[in-house]
Image: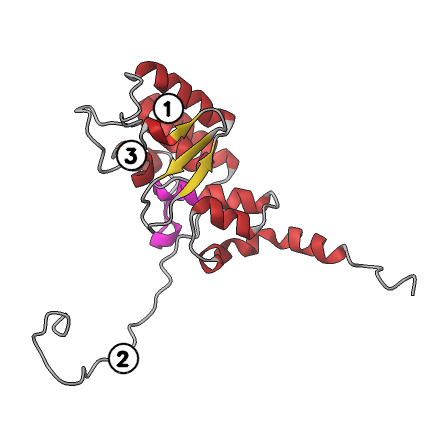
Amino acid sequence: MAFAHDLVNGINPCYKIKKPYKDSRRVRFLTPEEATNLLEKIKDKSLELYHESILSLFAGLRAGEIHNLHWSDINFDNKSIYIRDPKNKHSRHAYFTPEIESILLSKKDESQKKIDNLVFPSRSGKMRTQISASFKRIVEEIGLNEGISDPRQKVVFHTLRHTFASWLVQKGTPLYTVAELMGHKSLTMTSRYAHLAQENMRNAVNKISGMLDNL
């Protein structure tokens, strides 16, 4: 910081020192049973939070991306959502599942149908800045974080996005496709899900079995 602000001159004595690395990436994802239970509790508490949770779980959207959605980003013809100016500056498209389409159609009827309107505005009509605290309270109520001290294993709203990617990999989706849907700039970020695709990789290898039998 001192060098960046021209407060010191000469060689930076720290330029060869590397900061300690700690892998802080979340590794927890929900099972379908856990997700169903969580969503049911959320729906009972807050329909708006439930809608936000569905978009994260079935489209992989970050909380900030959901709150930044405008109706001009929604394309009902090809069932896609344009994610503008996300956290990593890598704009992308997300796609509807029937769950998402149903929610967006219901909300469109409630809105003023102006393309500049936010899809998930706050009560004042402005952009939301955070997820409702109800999410954390519900997670605690149903015990998803009971006995867990490692932050990477705790269920938070971002866990829904992580679950989206994990389920895709478990269903055999190529990591490159998952990376594109998640908006990852490189496969390095997506590689953490590779261990979930062991059965798919095993089946891929088995496909070349017997290639030399007819030689």
* Location of residue 99 in the rendering, given as x and y in whole percent from the top left corner: 48, 25
171 lies above or below 100:
below
Q: Are marks 2 and 3 in contact (CB under 8 Å)?
A: no
Mark with earlier residue (1, 3): 1
Q: Please provide the residue range marked out in magenta.
A: 148-162
Mark with earlier residue (2, 3): 2
Which label lies toward us, 2 or 3?
3
**Distance of label 2 from label 3 (alpha carbons):** 39 Å
Image point (22%, 27%), residue name: 122
Identify which residue, 186 or 169, lies in the foreground.
Answer: 186
Residue that carries the numbered disc 2 in the rendered image: 17
Identify which residue, 188 or 85, lies in the foreground.
Answer: 85
Residue that carries the numbered disc 1 in the rendered image: 43
Identity of the amino acid at label 3? His
Q: Can you tell which quarter of the image residue 201 is in?
A: bottom right
82 lies above or below 121:
below
Identity of the amino acid at label 1? Lys
Image point (34%, 43%), residue name: 156
Mark with earlier residue (1, 2): 2
